[in-house]
Image (cartoon, grey):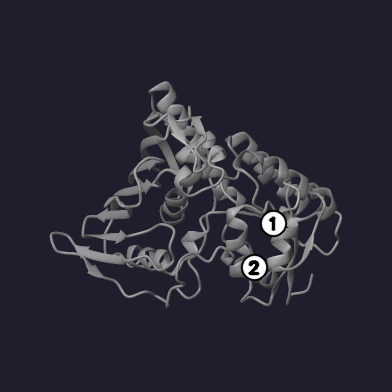
Amino acid sequence: MTERQMNVAIVGCGNIAGGYAETLRPHPQIKLLGATDVIPGRAAEFTAKYGGRAYASLDDLLADPAVDVVVNLTIHTEHPAVITRCLEAGKHVHSEKPLAMTYEEARRVVELAHQKGLRLSCSPITFMGEAQQTAWKVIRDGKLGPVRVSFAEVNWGRIEAWHPAPGPFYEVGALFDVGVYPLTLLTTIFGPARRATAFGKVLFPDRVTREGVPFHIETPDLVIAAIGFENGMVVRLTTDFYVGHHTKQTGIEFHGDKGSVYLSSWQSFDAAVEFAEFGKSYEPVPYVKTPYEGTEWARALVEMADAIAENRPQRATGEQAAHVVEILCAIQQAYRDERPVGIVSNFTPPAPMEWA
């Protein structure tokens, strides 16, 4: 691998793979070598559209010495096993979220990456977005004073309304699938969490796919958590697969002694950012940089390529992703046991983007 080009290959050609491939195109320092998938024909269809080679299997992909980084876009429960195989084969890895379904699994892959001297990054990387970096800068600049409470809303609708294969999402639940987004942003800005209490419930157990096939869910499709951070801040997190995007409860609110910031989306890089002094009305905040419209999924790989070229750690790290998994597991245990649960892991928070 040269400093000018990083060769990547994708494992898992589902819905999100197209977003990665599309957003890689403007970046000549990264080359998509190909993809593989367990469903016959899907990798060939993907590479016919986006270029590269359709690898017959993950083993075939890992045997290609030209592959520098594997982008793991498999279903949630397969992430640790796929990451482990890639690291054992000597490949750097960027994985979709969550890093694992248990903190023990997350720690194992982080430790393996360290042992192998390889890079492990994990989504979500939306904290790198222009809107998210703008909100963070307002907080860093002290305009809110001490931030004492944040409200994070993840009302993600009914997956079967838009996704052709909703089963894996409901198996892991909204908490693990999309709760990771605001938690990653919040830990980026404020550091580690230390305690969680929660309530979880299956609101809508019997559902129907777009093809009219009934299915039943048992993992809570609503989880509400209160999370205490090491710095004293409290987060109220709501995640659900029931309330749609029409809700007026969206994004994240950060509230401090002197004022508040509203970020309308923890995902979109061009989300609205507003600031209000205490007791006054919200006003728009200018972006620190013209934002990307929507979400640039490949920004994690661009940032990793830059980090390798500059011989520095990448911003999206396995350590932070593992800490977020521990928070998720603490929330899960808290609602199952109906008691508070402690959180002990640490990580080094990422630096702001240079342009922010």
Whole-percent x and y of residue 356? 44, 72
Question: From this viewpoint, which residue is outermost toward the left?
Answer: 279
- In front here: 213 or 152? 213
The 10 Å Cα crowd at callout 1, few under 14, some 14 to 19, many 20 or more, is many
Whole-percent x and y of residue 279? 13, 59
Mark linked to residue 307? 2
Above-or-below relation of 220 to 74: above
Which residue bears the numbered disc 1? 119
What's the residue at 76%, 66% (across, down)? 52
- Residue 327 visible: no
What's the residue at 79%, 49% (across, down)? 58
- In front here: 354 or 105? 105
Above-or-below relation of 301 to 108: below
Q: Quadrant of residue 301?
A: bottom right
Above-or-below relation of 170 to 183: above
User: Which amino acid lies under the numbered mark 1 shown in the image of this protein?
Assistant: Arg
Pick the quarter of the image with the N terminus.
bottom right
Which type of secondary structure does the marked residue at label 2 adopt? helix
Which type of secondary structure does the marked residue at label 1 adopt? loop
For the residues labelled 1 and 2, say whether their Cβ atoms are less than 8 Å apart. yes
What's the residue at 51%, 55% (across, down)? 349
- Residue 157 visible: yes
What's the residue at 69%, 56% (across, down)? 119
User: Which amino acid lies under the numbered mark 2 shown in the image of this protein?
Assistant: Ala
